[in-house]
Amino acid sequence: MELRDHTHHHPHGPHQGGDSAAMAELLDLDAAVLHSYLSDVTSWIQRQATDVPLRRILDLGAGTGTGTIALARRFGAAEVIAVDRAEELLTRVRAKAADLNIADRVRTVRADLDAAWPAVEPVDLVWASNSLHEMADPDRVFKDAFAAIRPGGLLAVAEMDALPRFLPEDIGLGRPGLESRCHEALEQERGDTQPRLGPDWGPHLERSGFTILGERTFTIDLTPPQPPATGHYAHAYLRRIRPVLEGRMATDDLAALDTLLDSDGPDGVLHRHDLVVRGTRTAWVARRP
Ligand SMILES: C[S@@+](CC[C@H](N)C(=O)[O-])C[C@H]1O[C@@H](n2cnc3c(N)ncnc32)[C@H](O)[C@@H]1O
């Protein structure tokens, strides 16, 4: 989930930071755990695209290709172009496409969208998931997207609304409510100068000339029993935020967190049977008139 976040204006973002291997792992676990969300959101887009032949799709800030692959599967006649500034992530997109025998329909383009829109042919759908909040000037990117989409074509944007939750209220270690206190500390660290999680892109879309067709909040609420990927996902997320929490939480909370991360026993997140995955993501579908 979150895993929106992830980002670079969010110093604590799980996806943030210079460690691209860790970020790639988190993005891939996000996709593994949230495959039903991905299926739901692409199906929702499909229902609004019945009058738009989707031949070419652009995935903006594609990361490891979660959306690229989900869209290529959903729209079997489309070519999907994954755009990202991180070549090491695009390498993963190509590898996944090859594994799935869809390399002929998946292309990658390395580009820094803060600098300029990439030179690609006109597209029928632009998808941007958890990426626009990382851009220096999202409104410029919306305008460039508008120009790149064929008249009648669509833009779909998704963002994470809140930090993901993995822990029950009482984990049997320390005081109840550990995860809430982690989130409070992250919010404090982020402060008022940082963009909040879950920007409301609706007004930006309208200002850029798009007509909004729909806005929908997808609720993620996965309860035990969980597949093993959930433990790895929780571990990757908590490991990523742990350094930011140092000095911002009570020592007993940090000790509990370290037990969650380090224990090979039943207390560790990799082996617990009480993990949840909770969060929400909001998506918009808009049309270029
Ligand atoms: C949190 S990840 C989301 C990845 C993917 N869309 C997903 O939902 O799993 C954000 C991605 O946006 C990319 N990104 C951020 N700013 C960018 C920019 N200015 N130009 C191109 N890519 C950018 C990052 O490299 C990263 O892969």
Image: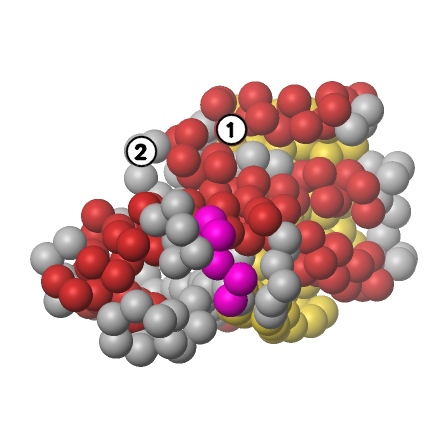
Left or right: 96, with 4 as reference point: right
Judge whether 289 appears above or below 220 on screen: above
Q: Position of residue 253 (x, y in %)?
A: 21, 65
Q: Which residue is mark 1?
A: 89
Label 2 SS: loop
Q: What is the number of the mark on residue 65?
A: none
In the image, what residue occupies the spot 81% across and 24% down? 101
Q: Nearer the viewer, residue 193 or 43?
A: 43
The reply to whether the magenta stretch includes residue 259 is no
In the image, what residue occupies the spot 39% across and 58% down? 267
Range of residues picked out in magenta:
269-274
Looking at numbered disc 2 in the image, what kind of residue is underneath it?
Answer: Gly
Q: Which residue is mark 2?
A: 18
In the image, what residue occupies the spot 38% across and 76% down? 170
- The span from disc 1 to disc 2 (Cα, nearest Å) is 12 Å
Q: Position of residue 71 (x, y in %)?
A: 74, 44
Ligand 1 has an atom within 8 Å of the beta carbon of the residue at disc 1: yes
In the image, what residue occupies the spot 48% across and 58% down? 272
Q: Nearer the viewer, residue 268 or 88?
A: 268
Residue 77, located in which quarter of the rendered image? Answer: top right
Looking at numbered disc 1 in the image, what kind of residue is underneath it?
Answer: Leu
Q: Residue furthest front?
A: 265
Q: Residues within 10 Å of mark 1 (few under 14, many from 20)?
A: many
